[in-house]
């Protein structure tokens, strides 16, 4: 019984996600869904990347948290339009569903946006199950988490197109085995591209920002 209910919720979500995907395609907007556990540094990684590309491509962000507008305030400082979603207002969902993205997108001028980044609610479980109409998905993990996260939360790593390992500036102080982490990632998702970055020092941010720009450009070229 419970499984049927969950299936129904996901079916309804898929219909809305398909509508979102069409709407974003009609406006030539490339959408990246960024997911991670809380504290991996999604917001600061995005701040750094946006800072690099915002003068070349027009970007916007939808940021989801259960409560507070702290992340939206930080991202606004990067000088791009930001819509904050607080899931607390509708039951404290631990993920962003497609209808929430539809609603949030109403607050943006999609015609003027090339790249829309969705910073999902910090959670490695159910955000992986909710299609929001995005073009690509990224999972951020940090070197202060266990190397075996990918095998503990395999769905997340399977549905994502790239993994970003953040906080590499901390490696000298930790026992974290980065190569083991990459092995764990690729055991779950063979050949998944892995970017190694530090939002603090800016190391590696350029490479993943380039990836983002290229993906957006190839969607435009294919339209
Ligand atoms: Mg955040
Ligand atoms: Zn959830």
Image (cartoon, rainbow, N blue to C red):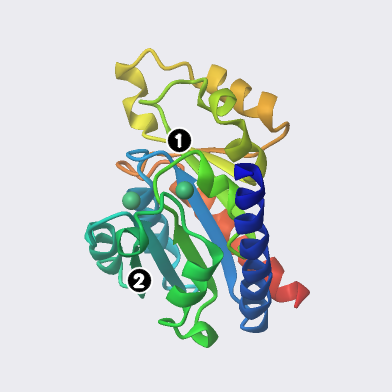
Left or right? Give the position of 70 relative to 75. Answer: left
Q: Which residue is mark 2?
A: 82
- Look at 25% across and 60% down and name the residue there: 74
Q: Position of residue 44 (x, y in %)?
A: 32, 50
- Look at 33% across and 16% down and name the residue there: 174
Q: Say whether mark 2 is within 8 Å of ligand 1.
A: no
Does residue 51 appear in this view?
yes
Looking at the figure, which quarter contains the C terminus? bottom right
Q: Which residue is mark 1?
A: 141
| Foreground pick, 106 / 166 | 106
Mark 1: few/some/many CA within 10 Å (<14, 14-19, 20+):
many
Looking at the figure, which quarter contains the N terminus? top right
- Look at 30% across and 72% down and name the residue there: 79
> Above or below — where is 137 with respect to 123?
below
Q: Position of residue 69 (x, y in %)?
A: 24, 62
The local secondary structure at tag 2 comes to strand
């Amino acid at each position: 019984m419970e499984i049927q209910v969950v299936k129904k919720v996901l079916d309804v979500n898929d219909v809305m996600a398909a509508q979102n995907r069409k709407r974003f395609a009609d406006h030539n907007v490339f959408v990246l869904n960024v997911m991670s556990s809380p504290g991996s540094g999604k917001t600061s990684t995005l701040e750094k990347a946006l800072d690099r590309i915002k003068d070349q491509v027009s970007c916007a962000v939808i940021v989801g948290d259960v409560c507070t507008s702290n992340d939206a305030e930080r991202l606004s400082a990067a000088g791009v339009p930001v819509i904050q979603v607080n899931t607390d207002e509708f039951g404290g969902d631990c993920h962003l569903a497609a209808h929430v993205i539809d609603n949030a997108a109403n607050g943006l001028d999609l015609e003027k946006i090339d790249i829309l980044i969705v910073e999902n609610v910090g959670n490695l479980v159910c955000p992986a199950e909710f299609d929001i109409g995005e073009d690509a998905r990224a999972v951020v993990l940090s070197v202060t988490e266990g190397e075996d996260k990918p095998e503990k939360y395999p769905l997340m790593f399977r549905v994502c197109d790239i993994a970003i390992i953040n906080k590499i500036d901390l490696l000298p102080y930790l026992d974290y085995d980065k190569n083991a982490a990459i092995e764990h990632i690729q055991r779950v998702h063979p050949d998944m591209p892995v970017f190694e970055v530090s939002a603090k020092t800016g190391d590696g941010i350029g490479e993943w920002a380039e990836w983002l720009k290229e993906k957006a450009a190839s969607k435009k070229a294919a339209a």
